[in-house]
Amino acid sequence: PQPVRLSDYRPPDWLVDTVDLDVRLHPTATRVIARLGLRPNPEGREGSAITLDGDELALKAVTLDGEPLAGSAYVATSSALTILAPPQRALVLEIETLVDPSANTKLMGLYRSSGTYCTQCEAEGFRRITYFPDRPDVLAVYTTRIEAEREEAPVLLANGNLVESGDVEGTSRHYAVWHDPWPKPCYLFALVGGRLDRVSDEFVTATGRKVDLGVYVEPGKAGRAGYAMDALKRSMRWDEEAFGCEYDLDVFNIVAVADFNMGAMENKGLNVFNDKYVLASPETATDADYANIEGIIAHEYFHNWTGNRITCRDWFQLCLKEGLTVFRDQEFSADQRSRPVKRIADVRLLKSHQFPEDAGPLAHPVRPQVYREINNFYTATVYEKGAEVVRMLKTLLGEEGFRAGMDLYFDRHDGDAATVEDFLACFADANGVDLTQFALWYAQSGTPKLAVSGQWDEAARSFRLDVSQTLAPTPGQSDKQPMVIPLAVGLVGPDGEDLPLVLDDGTNAERGVLLITQPKQSFVFRDVAERPVPSLNRGFSAPVKLTSDLSTAELVFLARHDADPFNRFDAGQTIALAYLVEATTAARTGRALSPPEALVEALGSTLEDSALDPAFIAQALSVPSEGDVAREIGTDVDPDAIHDARKALRQTLGEALAPALKAAYARHAPSGAYSPDADSAGRRALRNASLDLLAAGGSPEGIARAVGHFERADNMTDRFFALSVLAHSAPDAREAALAAFYERFRDDPLVVDKWLALQAQIAEPGTLARVGGLTTHAAFSWSNPNRVRALVGTFASINQTQFHRADGAGHDFVADAVLELDARNPQVAARLLAAFKSWRVLEPGRRASAERALRRVADRPGLSPDVSDIVSRSLE
Ligand code: B3K
Ligand code: ZN
């Protein structure tokens, strides 16, 4: 396909005001009659044809204002319907198409999941249901009539409010009519038909509107939908309180389906979810699952304002709804749980997913300028870095200035299909500031590097920070301009207390934030009587890679005393990462290495600090991942050496900290029944982190503790954590535990996914054969995205040593899987292929094998646009 460019944007020639759909559900031949109220767009080109998108559609009939169209008046292919020389006035086009939901393996458009009819339209799936101007700047009011066999689909749902339902007389069929009064783009359309159980509740909005809430799940699973419903109600309340956003329909429904390409979808009034992010019970879901459900339920709900009421003008503006909505769900979770721990988790995710994307061949700006397949741009950069950019706005403008900008945005753009410029203008106007340079965050890709050094002048009682920023070239961007970087800092005195931040000119340190706008800048603080330790980029105020001249001793000091919890955590991670890099070199060169004394010291005091939140301590105890170390090394990466270094470090920590870890394990034993709340989850996290380190060396005592933990567990968090400890650290106990786990949960696909994913992560040469074998296991299916992601996706994205096997067999396996999947589900295939994104940093042998595997994919004739786009950019 031809590249689509932001610079080529033109308003639509025709607008659609109303869409009346009549959908007659049938397993293989669903009939869709779409009546479109069209009119020429005064801002479009005069006299133009009506061009409607289609994808794998069979056209049955088309009429204009009730009259059948002559064959010469239109051109229909499976991918477009063009009405030639239409009258240039408001008109009604009625189009009848036939689609086969059972044959729809791409899971875009109308498809079936375990017999349930459902839809997925974002980004370009509506064109697989009917011919339509499938672009987000065409907003219409939808009325949807759905008809189906009552037996097959007793539940019929669509967007908006239910206006009518009943039997189709003299038949076994019934129908429902839904009306959505809010104009929306077609990517927010949804319908569902099936045999589903419903969990019901009610929410009364701030102004007293009563909203019926429904969560629909597969029959028999209603008992697992309670947490999702609770999270929904908390989200609705929070959005009113935090942003003044109130819900705007009489109904809000969520449907959980087992086959879904991503996490969930924010269709107006009818969110459709991957059931992984709805279903939870203490026996089947971990604390992390509960936290994900809470976050994703909130995210989709928050889209009602940021995405639905204000949508995107075109797909280049995707971050306008996604980055902003991620920021909103992060803030919600921070308010519901521990703010520092949530921030640590979010930054870990950013660094592990977005930083490598920004550093490799798939790097793109938060707002891309060109795409060949838009589905490949639902990325960590658009979502997570997009959220960081919004967070920086808040850091720059302060709480009130930020809220004023958001209020203006809702006020000014409600009902619009907006752009990033529109969004920024609201913050600029509400605060009287110029955000021109700030806008570079949307345009320049790559992670800025910030080098900071400090100089204390005893005689002048001053402290100077020298800051320089650089941004390396990225694909398509060779020259970069300096960015605006809000750098939150503190100066920590010898007693561990923050010193007042007084700049020599009395400016610029508002709320502890230094404004970096130049390639090089210096800041001098006055009245600094004693040598301070600077705490830099507090709360990770900017998504940059920061290096400093802090000594290991100073980092240990920050890990003990920094008033900023994020930097307290980060100081320990920086020490660990530096040690792991050194240990990796040592492992490759056979050099001896000194023990990690500073890290033991830092973690030891963290473990012993009873004032700290257990969830925080658990985060501090988890050493950087193999991927983190690979990224830090950056070139000539040998994953085996990294693995060995990390394994040795974990063993050393487990031994050196054993008394404190045993005490933490004992102190955080459960009291009472399982509850998913943040405090209880935090206690489990620390207990399990202790269990993990104590078993890391494979000592009989550590393993015995893990076996006991596994056998006594009364919830999935503990049971699965113990199972992973055994899988990674106890080859002898592993198989029995895995078998017992499978026997217990074999009928529960979401739990079986955990079992598949765990086996895919084992860092041993036998894993590739094991994963290959599991692809033929009864529990596995290539057609269910959750199964594929759990087994093959985990192998490729987490298992650094086995995916990057020196013999290239891991690369070949994943390439074969991509090719196998591509014919069935291109989106899932392309996502899997993106696991190769850091291939260029590997040592020459592995780099060559990755390149061979990528070339083999590239050479396959008939690739989908999705896979062909990823593979060609990966090789560029
Ligand atoms: N907006 C959807 C993602 C759609 C992905 C299409 N390939 C879910 C979300 O971000 O909320
Ligand atoms: Zn979203």
Image (cartoon, grey):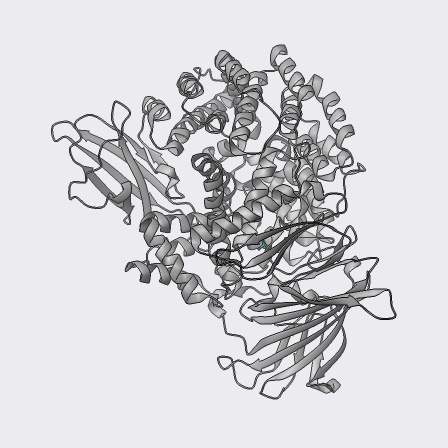
Give the answer, above or below, for where 785 lies relative to 841.
Answer: below
12 left or right of 767? Answer: left
639 left or right of 397? Answer: right
- Residue at image location 65% in from the left, 77% down from the top: 36
Q: How many marks?
A: 0
Residue situated in front as seen by the camera: 566 or 859: 566
Q: Give x and y (percent) for residue 749.
A: 74, 39
Residue situated in front as seen by the camera: 874 or 526: 526
Quadrant of ligand 1 in image: bottom right
- Residue at image location 28% in from the left, 43% down from the top: 511
112 left or right of 188? Answer: right
- Residue at image location 52% in from the left, 48% down from the top: 235
Viewport quadrant of the N terminus: bottom right
- Residue at image location 76% in from the left, 24% down from the top: 740
Give the answer, above or below, for where 100 lies relative to 606.
Answer: below
Residue situated in front as seen by the camera: 548 or 133: 133
Residue situated in front as seen by the camera: 575 or 414: 414
Give the answer, above or below, for where 733 lies relative to 99.
Answer: above
Q: Give x and y (percent) for residue 107.
A: 70, 55
Q: Give x and y (percent) for residue 311.
A: 51, 63
Give the answer, above or below, for where 429 lies relative to 771.
Answer: below
Residue 1 visible at all:
no
